[in-house]
Image (tube, rainbow, N blue to C red):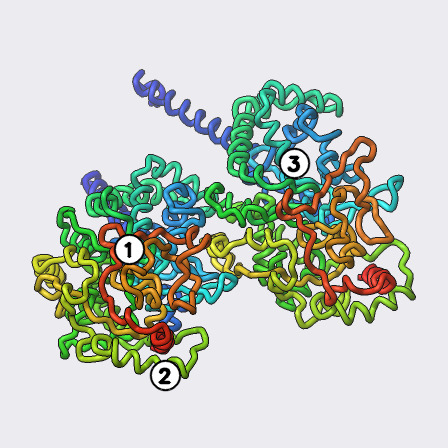
Amino acid sequence: MDEKASMSPAQRILKLIGLLTVAGLVVALLAGAWLLGRFGADTPVVYKDDVDHFKYGSLGSEHEFGVPYWIWRALPELFADKLPGKGLESLGFVFEKGKVLPAGMSQRRYLGFDLVWLNCAICHTGTVRESSQSEPKVYAAMPANTFDFRAFTRFLFAAGEDRRFTPRDILRQINVIRRREGLRDLALIDRLVFRFYAIYYMRERLLTLRDRLNFIKEEPEWGPGRVDTFNPLKAYFNFPPEKLSKQERVGTTDFPSIWNQGQRETLKMNLHWDGNNVSLEERNRSAAMGTGITPPTGDRPSLKRVADWLRDLAAPPYPFKIDKDLAAQGAPIYKKYCAECHGADGKDFRGEYAGKVVPIDEIGTDRHRLDSYTYDVAVNQNMIFAGYGDERFSHFRKTFGYANSPLDGLWLRAPYLHNGSVPTLRDLLEPSAKRPKIFYRGYDVYDQKKIGFVGDVAEEKGKKFFLFDTDETKEPGNSNKGHEGKRFGTELSAAEKDALVEYLKTF
Amino acid sequence: MADAQKKKSWWKICLLLIVVLAVVGGAIGWYKFFREEPQPDWVTATPDMRFKYGSIGAEHDAGIPYWIFFVLPRMFPEKLPGPGGYASLGVAWEQGQELPIGFTKKVIGFPRVANNCASCHVASYRKSASDNPVFVPTGPNHTLNLQAFFRFVVDCAKDPRFNADEIMSEIALVYKMPLLDKLIYRYLLIPIAKKRLLEREKQFQWVYHKEFPLWGRGRDDAMNLTKYFLLNWPMDDSIGPTDMPSVWNLKKYKPEKGMLMNLAGDSHDARSVIIDSALGLLSAAPHNREEFLEQIDWLVKYLGEKQAPKYPFPINQAQAEAGKAVFDSNCARCHASERTGTRVPAEEIGTDRERLKTWSKQAAIESNKVVRGFGIERRGLVEIEPSGYIAAFLDGIWLRAPYLHNGSVPTLRDMLKPVADRPKIFYRGYDVYDPVDVGFVTQGAEAERVGTKYDVSQRASANQGHEYGTNLSAKEKDTLIEYLKTL
């Protein structure tokens, strides 16, 4: 008997429903697979070269803070009026030839979008020019001497507050850029997500972040090359800033160079300006949190690759002329005055007090940074990375002074002292009364005589530099006092100082 | 026939499936809620570590799920007394340690946080403002703001933001939780934690009493805690916050010589005090009585033998020698004699009497009954009306500032002044030590910022009484103080 013929109408309807269900399921599965492919991927842009990985590789900060690439592109054009000058360059970002993203920004495909955000190089890559006519040379792992982190956040928050931060305005700007670059308009699905979700979400996040970091407004301006390291951490813990004691509210410091980390680790040196941690690995992850990674979202292998590379990375040699004879005269002076605390030379960091913390009264430098890091912060850090086994922080310690740092690549680490209050090495060898009271930061033309960046240029081709005032009564945290007196070499003769500076070029 | 058989085996398979599912479900349930993991080895590596971080079993009923504990200060910083997360409560938190001393982490199904004796019985001091603290296990926790901690936890639970959505999104920022755990947190642990904390609101009522002065750092209203938590009595009008005591060298208390324990001689012996205090931390009958009593035995031994810490600054031996004579003729009568460890009538000692009103014969009788009901035998609480304070042993007296049972006199030097000359307002809970007056620094900008204000005119806070040695000459006082450093 034919089966079909034996089916009742009800059975036929059931069968039809069954078939439709199966078909529906197949479609749903396919759609699901497509969506998963479209939105489920988590793949960073990868670089073969270690230097490129350092400058452009992703540490995973995009997971939590990522800005869609095309919105990132649109912001400086749509909100050009919120920038201090022309383009992102006016914030001191370092753009290399042929790159659309600045050094210190990485890209990752996540949640269906190309997202961009920060990596280590944002604070640890800078530029040097021999003269105002020459091309800048980019040095990875040197302090980001031109980048103004605070001005950057100010720009983002100003954009987020602006009434043009709408899907309509941003999408229009994106398409203007895409057409200019010969690309088609954004795909429909991207437009939809941007229009109905991403832009509103980003605005909300920006404004939340602005409120969390609002306390920074009370601090003196950082200027290029500086950051407050540990007060933002208090914001991360959500400590109410208005309840913080007054003496801990300013913690501005110079960005450090980060080459030659291996020897520091081997010699168990106290890391960070106040020497609050001896674990290199922990210090690295703590710093990476500053770029926006969180314990659940950090890209461990990528971070390890950067850390391994920095272990053995040598400081770049001084590229200008060195007077060998004069330098040779400086060597014994260094040995007599500096080596005990700063290590045997630029390659060998061993010294009786090298990497150790000197009590604040002895060193006499500005104490704001020291006081900004409190015992309460140290113990709260013990809970960071909890749930991830050995990764949990356990090495942070409150100290009561500043750590003696090795002087490798010293020529690239100007301005000097932890707060970057002394423009050149030669100035540092003068007693504080004779050090420059004001100077400009953010200019990258090199001063071969005094060793450091030229500090008396206020403006070049429309780009204004930052006037740094060492008057602590006006700008708490900026004092250029300390590290002075006989044992610090400020009483040497002028000729001896010149010789010492010449010798330090070899570091 | 065949059909019937088919049906039968079909049922069998179903039944088997159900059994398998039930077993698997049960195993997962046991694993996720009841499996007990021993604490890691470092916790029990030394007796001091065990005292500081070892579980006494409080995680079963008083444990907070770890990740809720983790995010509360970040979500509700406005409910804490200051910036600094839990640190703002004055907990003794060692550098490098995940949790403060006295906070225990243990996996019972899921990681939980509870407390042990060390939360109130660890002292911290700093030799100067540019020194890190030294922590002394079994010393009094003079920095802990226990009342603020109680309030914080209850206030959080009462806040509408204490809900699964907000807590889970805060946790997601710090920890990638496995899916099953996420479901457990969202649908069970967070609602249950909220419910259980709110259930305690009535017991905590007295902590919010508008007319009572705040305890401030380093003090605990211990007998009321027992009345409201162990006995579930309704709130009465009594208040008696007292100084956290040191709990070292408990062997010195000899019950056979008529000595009693607790500030007012409320308990017969060390074992009873330890049991009752531990039950307070468990806030329920012990989950496992045998294990609990083993813990108690260990604590009795540890606290019995642990000695008071040596004075960490130099002592002028000649002065101290001279001071011993002053001590013998002025203090020894009560503090180094048969009388030490026994009750001195309140009329005689003359110190603030509010603490005595927080306890009663009836409370002692009922408490003893409750503990017996748990199947725990102990000599227990003394079933008489409180009438005076215990003449204290003075071992480690340097670290037991501020002085008197209510902590109303900041330093030993102040103790030797007549009441009228003792400080009327000072700040408690700052841990920089004052080796001149012997006690903690209680005045100045930092003491004011860190500490809590102590006003001797407030209820239960009077600094009257114990006016002994106040007529000694300045020189005699100096030598006496020098001698007291050696105890």
Query: Can residue B64 be seen here?
Result: yes
Question: Are labels 3 and 1 on one chain?
Answer: no
Label 3, label 2: how many angstroms apart (C-alpha)?
A: 68 Å
Within 10 Å of disc 3 (Cα), the crowding (few <14, some 14-19, many 20+) is some
Q: Is residue A260 above or below residue A454?
A: below
* Labels 2 and 1: the sequence-earlier one: 1
Q: Amino acid at mark 1?
A: Phe
Residue at position x 49%, y 48% from top?
A245
Q: Is residue A297 above or below residue A40?
A: below
Query: Can residue B251 be seen here?
Result: no
Measured from the top left, where is residue A135 in percent x and y?
A: 86, 41
Question: Are labels 3 and 2 on one chain?
Answer: no
Residue pointed to by mark 1: B34
Q: Nearer the viewer, residue B254 or A314?
A: B254
Q: Which element type, helix, strand or loop, lies under badge 1?
A: loop
Label 3 close to label 1 by CB (< 8 Å): no
Observer-side mark, 2 or 1, equals 2
Chain containing the residue with disc 1? B
Residue pointed to by mark 2: B321
Residue pointed to by mark 3: A152
Measured from the top left, where is residue B378 in percent x and y?
A: 14, 69
Q: Is residue B228 left or right of residue B99?
A: left
Q: Is residue B161 above or below residue B354?
A: above
Question: Are labels 2 and 1 on one chain?
Answer: yes
